[in-house]
Image (spheres, rainbow, N blue to C red):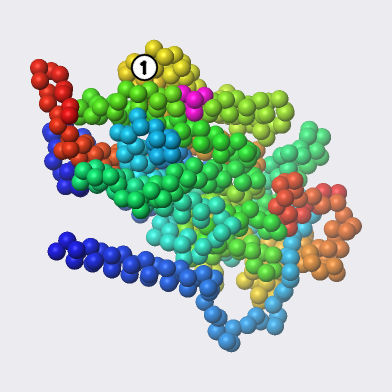
Amino acid sequence: MAIKRRDFLKLTGLTLVGTAASAAVGDLLTRGEAKAEEEYAFSPKALKGKRWAMIIDVKKCKEGIEKGCGKKCIKACHYLHNVPSIPDKKKEIKWIWEDEFEHAFPEQTNEYLEEIFKDIPFLFLCNHCDNPPCVRVCPTKATFKNDEGIVMMDFHRCIGCRFCMAACPYGARSFNWVDPRPYIEKVNPEYPTRTKGVVEKCLFCYERLAQGKVPACVEACPEKALIFGDLADENSEVSKILKERVAIRRKAELGTNPSVFYLID
Amino acid sequence: MLEKALVGSKKYWFWVLFLLTIIFIGFVCYLYQFKIGLGITGMSRDVSWGFYIANFTFLVGVAAGAVMIVLPYYWHNHKVYGKITILGEFLAVAAVTMCILFVLVDLGQPMRVLNVIRFPTPNSIMFYDVIVLNVYLLLNLICGWTVLHAEYKGTKYPSWLKPIIYLAIVWAPSIHIVTAFLYQGLPGRHFWLTAVMAPRFLASAFSAGPALVIIAALLLKKVANFDPGEKAIDSLAKTVAYAFIANVLLFIFELFTAFYSGIHSHQASIKYLFVGLEGHAEWVPFMWAATILAIVGILLLVIPQTRKNETTLVIASIAVFISCWIDKGIGLITGGYTPTPFETITPYRPTLPEIGITLGVWATGFLIMTILYKIVLEVRASTELVVKYEGIVYKK
């Protein structure tokens, strides 16, 4: 009887290990990707780029706020993407928001710069780094860099470990501490809502790019303070502006190579 | 051998019931967290890891600390550790189980945890951490159980176990180096961005782990007639002393780099923890408690008279254990997230349900330790001839 039980246990163990191993090998070989339908293709209108980037003209942003733009960029983004309004600031979710110079460039600040930039708003969002530490640490590739330079998220794969939030040097990521759905002011049925327990952030409106539109914040700004384009294209607006004007990036010394530039001249 | 944990004295069952009660409370708190989400904890957008990960980090060290007993015994024939290697291995099993549980209760989507295995990501240190922790659990279970079973049968352990024991010895420091690498490679967290994180982790592991074995062994001596041997305890105490001094020294070296260089980002977290920063001083009392406990622990351990006295040794071990727990647990985590990337401060404090779940996990670990240690005691008792005559214990 003892030997029979052992054999049974050995067989069960082998079956379990074999099943797990074959699943793992299968996933390894397919890299966890399912094959897309043959008819699936990008719309001919789609904007394509190799390194999407954004330039924020802070002085134009200030002009906009003084004229009463009502922070249309933030409102557009948060409405379009079903970003909830969580009352508890500690648990808030924000994809793009406004803050001060000394919080954007804390290692650069001095009393003179703080005075110059005293009333000038600085917009914060994911920098879509070219060397993103968040992508490097994600254990499931739930966050990954796509071939257009956008740091993407797969909300279905995210296990909510929040390692990416620890790794991001910019505090760009938010976590769904509770179910966000009751806190969405007006649901946009054309974009998915998220579940509790996953991380989220700005995704450079990849879904709008696929339809030939620029990101929602860029389109919403009445002063055109946000400029979006392909850094890998010499003739794009962003490349031209960066050749002529003084732009800085947040925490550039960390080697993340961010794609969001702030015009400060 | 598991059936040996099912017979015991009233004290034993009272202790088991006490642990089960705490586990039950923790479980109910977890159901609440599973329903509402991690929002029931004190964590925030700015401090996105907290008490769970703090305990996880500390316990990986405790698990690795078992190697301080196993290595000298198997590699250098340090025979005095003969009776307590099994205590170290089973402590590792309990500690690693707690680590895994702490990670699971911290996940936002725990049902998806197998995604880490389904989508292997070799550039992610967390991928490796999941592997090394689970394999370490398996290795210690196999080693401990097989050696104990051989003792139970009155024979030597089988030869196929030897390479597995050697693998477990090499694996032990690796689990803690990998865990340290989780922290020391993050470019935005200056408190963690130091090469000294891995050596500090190892030093505190090799003090806290053996300290807990000392406490457990002396407790078993008191309540269950288990004698680890005076030489073994003294050897362990010296290990704790040297390892803990190394840990404190490494911290002092950190202080030098931070304050002699004058670089604000190196100093800010240390200031927040020890003297407060910008009006926030939430963790200052805890860090100074850890400091005082460290001094008490070191003094009691280096003075031979207090090291050899069982009462003061237990006090020293408890002091070292708690000091490491504070410094490497919540001190490490809140220090890493404070100040935030915006140079602001968002305070963190665990909530009651969060503490409830934490206690539930600790109780689970202690229950595993209790069961495994009970089996060890019963096996030893059944193979030894012990007679208590006129208050004196005679052993064959």
Q: Which span is picked out in magenta?
A: B241-245
Give percent across and percent down for residue B60: 44, 42
- Left or right: residue A83 versus residue B239 is right
Q: Quadrant of the C terminus of chain B?
A: top left
B244 part of magenta stretch = yes
Q: Which residue is mark 1?
A: B308
Q: Crowdedness of circle 1 by 10 Å Cα count: few (<14), some, many (20+)?
A: some
Q: Relative to residue A263, is residue B230 depicted above or below?
A: above
Tag 1's secondary structure? helix
Identify the residue shown where x is 59% and y is 65%.
A80
Q: Residue furthest top?
A: B305
| Of the pair B258 and A190, the residue shown nearer to us | B258
Give percent across and percent down for residue A106: 71, 39
The image quarter containing residue B210 is top left
Amino acid carrying label 1: it is Lys
Q: Relative to residue A254, is residue A112 depicted above or below?
A: above
The image quarter containing residue A35 is bottom right
Give percent across and percent down for residue B49: 50, 44
Q: Chain of mark 1?
A: B
Identify the residue shown where x is 25% and y is 64%.
A9
Secondary structure that dominates the magenta span: helix
Identify the residue shown where x is 73% and y is 65%.
A52
The count of marks equals 1
| Of the pair B59 and B394, the residue shown nearer to us | B394
Any part of residue B326 in sight: no
Q: Relative to residue B129, is residue A80 depicted above or below?
A: below
Q: Relative to residue B236, is residue A105 depicted above or below?
A: below
B17 part of magenta stretch = no
| Of the pair B340 and B266, the residue shown nearer to us | B266
Identify the residue shown where x is 30% and y is 33%.
B83
